[in-house]
Amino acid sequence: MQERGGNGMAAYLVFLEQRDGILAEASVNLWHRVQHHAVPGADRVSGFVAGPLRPGALEPLFGAGVVHHAAEERLARSSETTLSRLLAALAAREAITDIVIASTSAGKRLAPCLAQATGASLLSGCVAGGFQEPVCRRPIHCGSILVACVPEAPVRIYLQDRLPQVLFTGTEHPRSVAFDIVPHLDADEKMNPAVRSITEISRQRDISEAGIIVAGGRGMGGPEGFLLLEKLAALLGGSVGASRSAVDEGWRPHGDQIGQTGKSVSPDLYIAAGISGALQHLAGLSAARTIVAINADPDAPVFGVADYGIVGDVLAVLPRLIDVLGDVLPKK
Ligand SMILES: Cc1cc2nc3c(=O)[nH]c(=O)nc-3n(C[C@H](O)[C@H](O)[C@H](O)COP(=O)(O)OP(=O)(O)OC[C@H]3O[C@@H](n4cnc5c(N)ncnc54)[C@H](O)[C@@H]3O)c2cc1C
């Protein structure tokens, strides 16, 4: 592990993602994780947020530190190139050692640009370690091997998968200061309209951040089967995901696909309905905490990784599950 800054202390910079002026839950959780991990009185914690914020938007953040706020309207939807230039300038001025970014769709686009702009080591897809330990472990070959990644550059960027929430409260809130670096921003401000519309779609919903995912595969039988999953997800306060087969069938958008060629997710609860459990699907699940599988075939490979299994027809099991949970869960 490289020295943590010249004096052995770490200086963290958390990228705080915002949507419509409200901080993304993933960023708030990450901020508290970093606060929890930082050594009080030694390590420094700061944040960066771009674009106008709603009044009180920073109130969910607890802990000491400073949030650098670049409030200009045009920065709310700026390209990764622009954001990475702002962050790189800030990181250099503040002698930042560790930049932490939530692994959302926006975070995944930003981190490599920032690594290029700063020359930092980029650590992504780590299922253990992350910014909290010197060595990160990331799965390769569909999760069959874990490799240890040791950053070499003096500055590290962690593209951090979702971590369980920590309860971090107190009376102290970070100080908000106006971002006062004025790097030369030019043509890259004009984002390609096609990229912009994809960015906007992906901002609406991101299963990488979900704490509960109800996912369906070919066994759901069609888009109408997914209505049951929508119902269940709404009851549980979760999001709907899909296997590649369900996406290839056109039943769900590609943004919902989980697996090797889709998204890696790290929910506390993953319900796999009518999904066989192919290696390429499971590759996106290595950080899921509890897996519940519903499948008609008792020999389906998904049962090999499930914590709880229900053998049965999804079209019979899911309505019963929805009824029972509807009776016991508070209405959302
Ligand atoms: C290079 C590569 C990359 C890939 N990337 C991905 C990826 O990112 N994500 C991904 O998911 N896949 C990926 N795949 C595809 C993967 O190999 C599987 O084909 C896919 O995951 C299978 O999806 P499935 O489980 O929904 O469908 P199937 O394999 O067809 O399984 C359907 C399951 O539903 C069950 N079933 C059927 N009817 C019912 C019912 N009524 N009630 C209950 N259970 C029922 C069946 O028993 C079966 O287990 C990739 C493949 C390759 C080659």
Image (cartoon, rainbow, N blue to C red):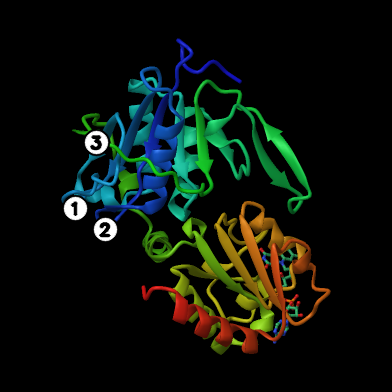
Q: Which mark is residue 296?
A: none
Q: Which mark is residue 171?
A: 3
Farthest residue toward the left?
55
The span from disc 1 to disc 3 (Cα, nearest Å) is: 21 Å
**Contact, mark 1 vs mark 2 (Cβ under 8 Å):** yes
Identified at 52% across, 20% down, the residue is: 154
Residue at left 50%, top 34%? Answer: 157
Secondary structure category for the residue under label 3: loop
Badge 3 or badge 2: first in the primary sequence: 2
Q: Quadrant of residue 63?
A: top left
Residue identifier under label 2: 20
Dividing the image into 4 quarters, which one contains the N terminus?
top right
Rendered residue at 51%/63% (across/down)? 212
First-in-chain label (1 vs 3): 1
Tell me which amino acid carries mark 2.
Answer: Asp
Q: Which numbered mark, 1 or 3, is in the foreground of this view?
A: 3
Amino acid beneath label 1: Arg
Q: Is residue 241 above or below residue 98?
A: below
Disc 1 and disc 3 in contact, CB within 8 angstroms:
no
Q: In which quadrant will I find the C terminus?
A: bottom left
Left or right for 271, reference 166: right
Q: How far apart in space, not on screen, are marks 3 and 2 (Cα)? A: 26 Å
Q: Residues within 10 Å of mark 2 (few under 14, many from 20)?
A: few
| Vertical side of 68 occupied by 29: above or below | below
Query: Which of marks 2 and 1 precedes in the sequence?
Result: 2
* Type of amino acid under label 3: Thr
